[in-house]
């Protein structure tokens, strides 16, 4: 997953102009329209990175930091039925490990830093996290918090509405109709995770995204000549007149709180 994310970032850096890279999965769903998202982010400094992170590794220090997964093709092994081998390694001393949510919103500048790597840190950490368990939950956090240039650009939030069982299991709880009100009140632009064809998705489409039946995209200034199924002409460089709704106001309320002085600096890379 980490390699796929970095590859996507590298391709987009070549072919398009953009300010933030947002990684999502098939289990994620938007709670705001594209116009809401563009409008809410338009007033933010372009160097901000939304990366939920912590240096308090807890059980992950031994279960994630020390194990190293080795390809059996590179390891002498007689039992062919074993697909991979787990070895133990000492914890690094050249950098501090961080962990957090795999879902991030990264600035173009930080994306270029990770891809081009004008210093050794991104490459060094990529080698370390190549055989790391759940590397998307640590790579970007560790890179940005060990970088003098970028560690003060972090907003410690992944902008997702997620709920967990008590005690928490490996994966978050699937959301349904009973979670709709809490999702809206959270002011967050994305939620996860959802099962296929969950009825709450229809309510999100109708009440939050203003989608018509069968429409793939929410109409707005980010695209023109939209038909019943989608956009015929994407506005890549010059957006049309945006049509933000209540989702933009909700999201701006959350963003204003996250980047305000009492919350912003105190939660950075501790």
Image (spheres, grey):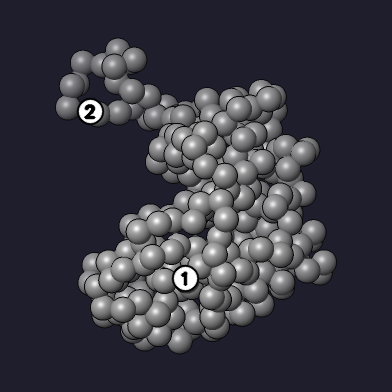
Mark 1, secondary structure of its residue: loop
Q: Which mark is residue 119?
A: none
Q: Residue furthest right?
A: 261
- Of 179 and 224, which appears nearest the observer? 224
Is 148 on the left-hand or right-hand side of 10?
A: right
Residue 253 placement (x, y as % from top left)? 66, 77
> Residue visible at 78% across and 38% down?
148
Q: Is residue 190 above or below residue 112?
A: below
- Of 204 and 59, which appears nearest the observer? 204
Is 223 on the left-hand or right-hand side of 41?
A: left
Quarter of the image for residue 81 reads top left
Mark 2, secondary structure of its residue: loop
Is 177 on the left-hand or right-hand side of 24?
A: left
- Of 138 and 57, which appears nearest the observer? 138
- Of 257 and 225, which appears nearest the observer? 225
Quarter of the image for residue 210 reads bottom left
Q: Is residue 74 above or below residue 28?
A: above
Residue 161 placement (x, y as % from top left)? 49, 70
> Residue visible at 30% across and 12% down?
76
Where does the N terminus fall, quadrant-wise?
A: top left
Residue 77 placement (x, y as % from top left)? 26, 16
Q: Which mark is residue 82?
A: 2
Question: Badge 2: few (under 14), some or many (20 or more) residues near its Cα, within 10 Å?
Answer: few
Q: Nearest to the eye among marks 2 and 1: give it.
A: 1
Q: Is residue 173 visible?
A: no
Residue underneath mark 1: 220
> Residue visible at 35% across and 77% down?
211
> Residue visible at 30% across and 28% down?
84
**How far is the residue under mark 2 from the one under mark 1?**
52 Å
Question: Badge 1: few (under 14), some or many (20 or more) residues near its Cα, within 10 Å?
Answer: many
- Which numbered disc flags the more N-terminal residue, 2 or 1? 2
């Amino acid at each position: 997953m980490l390699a796929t994310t970095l590859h996507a970032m590298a391709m987009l850096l070549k072919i398009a102009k953009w300010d933030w890279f947002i990684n999502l999965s098939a289990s994620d769903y938007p709670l705001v329209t594209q116009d809401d998202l563009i409008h809410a982010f338009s007033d933010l400094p372009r160097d901000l990175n939304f990366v939920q992170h912590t240096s308090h590794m807890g059980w992950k220090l031994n279960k994630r930091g020390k194990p190293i997964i080795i390809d059996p093709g590179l390891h002498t092994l007689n039992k062919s039925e074993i697909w991979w081998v787990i070895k133990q390694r000492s914890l690094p001393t050249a950098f501090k490990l961080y962990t957090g949510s795999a879902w991030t919103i990264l600035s173009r500048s930080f994306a270029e830093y990770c891809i081009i790597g004008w210093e050794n840190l991104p490459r060094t950490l990529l080698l370390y996290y190549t055989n790391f368990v759940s590397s998307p939950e640590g790579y970007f956090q560790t890179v940005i918090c060990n970088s003098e240039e970028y560690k003060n650009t972090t907003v410690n939030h992944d902008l997702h509405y997620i709920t967990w069982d008590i005690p928490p299991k490996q994966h978050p709880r699937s959301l349904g109709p009973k979670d709709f009100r809490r999702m809206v009140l959270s002011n967050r632009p994305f939620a996860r995770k959802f099962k296929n064809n969950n009825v709450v998705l229809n309510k999100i489409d109708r009440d939050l995204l203003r989608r018509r039946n069968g429409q793939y995209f929410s109409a707005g200034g980010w695209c023109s000549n939209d038909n019943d199924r989608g956009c015929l002409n994407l506005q890549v460089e010059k957006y049309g007149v945006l049509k933000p709704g209540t989702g933009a106001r909700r999201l701006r309320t959350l963003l204003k709180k996250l980047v305000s002085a009492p919350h912003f600096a105190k939660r950075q890379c501790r």
